[in-house]
Image (cartoon, rainbow, N blue to C red):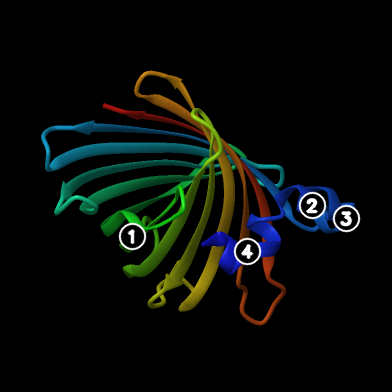
């Protein structure tokens, strides 16, 4: 799907990394995201998942430490319904600033369609957001797609696209409408039984009203454990 939405980013990553001029990179921010995901099946229907992420950037230093806890119910072979709670501890150069709490509802399909050996999956997430020190509840909708392409028995190329829509305005969610897109490419590989690693790059484009849009370049590393 990323190839269809943003072929210049997701399908031509090597050319992008080489071709972006130094001046353009200097005007953007480079981020580093380290994350982990642990999933445990309680039975054939119920799965518990905990995702954690630490995020830093050249311009902001350590700016986020996030934890998502989710309970998923497998409605059928490919559809999972999920409820979850997120704690987002926000920092500036490592100094704590505030906490954002989120309640999320999600429907996900681990196989929308097969394209040869490649598998297209997708999810639709609704979030209610509260931030300490700010009034109001921010509502956000996030549709996502992911194309997993097996390269060998141990390597998988992943292309993904996340689109963030703010559905209202609050003291911290200043505008409604299209907020940002995240276009990512990663390589997945097994480490040991039940544990895998994904290393990748993500381009995050922010839509700014009455000003120049933002572009962030994110280096990602994720350890995934499923039991």
Circle 2/circle 3 CB separation < 8 Å: no
Quadrant where the C terminus sits is top left
Q: Earlier in the sequence, mark 1 or mark 2?
A: 2
Answer with left or right where residue 123 lies relative to residue 198.
Answer: left
Mark nearer the N terminus (1 vs 4): 1
Residue at x-position 57% and y-position 42%: 186
Side of 74 where 223 appears, left or right: right
Name above or below for residue 192 compared with residue 156: above
Residue depicted at 55% across the width and 58% down the height: 182
Where residue 196 appears, as percent x and y from the top left, is 44, 27
Q: How many marks?
A: 4
Numbered badge on residue 130: 1
Name which of mark 2 and mark 3 comes first in the sequence. Answer: 2
Specify which label sits upstream in the sequence, 1 or 3.
3
Q: Position of residue 75 (x, y in %)?
A: 14, 54
Badge 2 marks a residue whose secondary structure is helix
In the rendered structure, are the residues bearing label 1 and label 2 in contact, judged by CB atoms less than 8 Å apart? no
Between 186 and 216, the one nearer to me in the picture: 186
Residues at marks 3 and 4, CA–CA distance in whole angstroms: 17 Å
Quickly name the residue at label 4: 205
As drawn, the label of residue 172 is none
Question: Residue furthest toward the bottom?
Answer: 210
Whether residue 107 appears in this view of the structure is yes
Q: Which residue is mark 2?
A: 15
The mark that comes first in sequence, 3 or 4, is: 3
Q: Which mark is residue 21?
A: 3
Image vertical order of residue 170 relative to residue 30, above or below: below
Q: CA distance from mark 1 to mark 3?
A: 39 Å
Looking at the image, tell me whether mark 4 or mark 2 is earlier in sequence order: 2
Q: At which x and y percent is residue 33?
A: 56, 39
Give the SS element for disc 4. Answer: strand
């Amino acid at each position: 799907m990323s190839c269809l939405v943003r072929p210049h980013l997701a399908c031509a990553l090597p050319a992008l990394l080489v071709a972006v001029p130094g001046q353009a990179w200097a005007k953007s921010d480079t981020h580093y995201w380290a994350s982990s995901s642990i999933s445990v099946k309680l039975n054939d229907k119920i799965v518990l998942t905990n995702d954690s992420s630490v995020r830093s950037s050249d311009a902001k230093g350590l700016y986020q430490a996030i934890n998502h806890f989710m309970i998923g119910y497998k409605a059928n072979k490919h559809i999972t319904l999920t409820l979850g709670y997120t704690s987002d501890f926000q920092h500036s150069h490592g100094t704590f600033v505030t906490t954002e709490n989120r309640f999320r509802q999600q429907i996900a399909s681990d196989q929308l369609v097969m394209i040869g050996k490649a598998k297209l999956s997708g999810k639709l997430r609704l979030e209610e957001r509260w931030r300490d020190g700010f009034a109001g509840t921010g509502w956000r909708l996030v549709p996502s797609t992911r194309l997993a392409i097996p390269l060998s028995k141990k390597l998988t190329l992943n292309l993904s696209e996340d689109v963030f829509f703010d559905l209202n305005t609050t003291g911290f969610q200043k505008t409604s409408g299209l907020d940002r897109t995240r276009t990512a490419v990663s390589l997945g590989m097994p480490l040991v039984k039940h544990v895998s690693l994904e290393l990748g790059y993500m381009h995050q484009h922010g839509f700014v009203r009455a000003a120049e849009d933002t572009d962030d370049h994110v280096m990602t590393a994720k350890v995934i454990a499923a039991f």
